[in-house]
Amino acid sequence: MGREIESIALERGHEISQRFDSSRPLRAEDLSNCDIAIEFSRPEMAAKHITICASAGIPVVVGTTGWYEKYDEVAAAVKAHNTAMLCATNFSLGVNITFFLNEVLARIMNNYPEYQTGITEIHHTKKLDAPSGTAITLAEGILNSHAAYESWKLESGASFGPTLPIEAIREAEVPGTHIVRYNSPIDSIEIKHTAHNRRGFAMGAVVAAEWTADKNGIFGMKDMLNFEALIH
């Protein structure tokens, strides 16, 4: 992802002023010539990295998932230093369209209790968290829009509620596939997003960085894309 992000940023006329990885850890003093940071590292490091950026007054776009138990304290640090964070489980435009359609469909299916619901996500074998952050976002969209569901659980299958199952499959060389299914005895309805490569994720992260660089506050892709405005 780092290489993809760098390639797209350079194509769009930006400069990569600093690079950090396990061999060169992030330090606040190295951020003085930066306008914004993009965080795609590991779940156990993300919160620390965001907090360091906040302490240096640097806005940050966060694509790492699996660290959300520390979200509230990290968001407080960002606000305390009057800077910005845009955090997303997936920066792909197609995935964010899927998130929006998922919420709309869940509101509709709330009126049709004969349908069972389940989510399947498929990723490469090197993915560290399960279920994926994208699958959790899809589940949260259903929980917020469908009265039958109160929580999600990592397991296969479909249910009428109150628990929404998420199945996580790991296969070699799969960038990311997410499927939301509604099954009844007479038919099935399905929303599916299949990523063909990582370029869509990287492009979304760079565009998000461009949008966030001059802002203060906590944001998500919904704030940037504002799909609701397109259908009213």
Image (tube, rainbow, N blue to C red):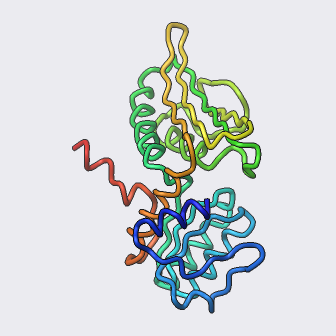
Residue at horizontal 52 percent and vertical 73 percent from the top: 60
The residue sitting at 30% across, 47% down in the picture is 228
Count of labels shown?
A: 0
Residue 89 located left or right of residue 46: left
In the rendered structure, the answer to whether residue 40 lies left or right of residue 79 reads right
Q: Position of residue 30 (x, y in %)?
A: 62, 89
Residue at 61% across, 41% down: 176
Which image quadrant: the N terminus? Answer: bottom right
197 or 84: nearer the viewer: 197
Pick the quarter of the image with the C terminus: top left
The spot of residue 86 in percent (x, y) is 48, 66
Q: Position of residue 151 (x, y in %)?
A: 62, 40
Find the residue positioned furthest to the top: 186
> Relative to 128, does residue 211 appear above or below in the rendering?
below
* Left or right placement of residue 163 versus residue 191 in this view: right
Instruction: In the rendered view, tell whether residue 27 sits above or below residue 116.
Output: below
Nearer to the camera, 146 or 194: 194
- Relative to 51, say whether 120 is above or below: above
Q: Is residue 218 left or right of residue 31?
A: left
**Image coordinates for residue 212, horizontal then vertical, percent:** 41, 71
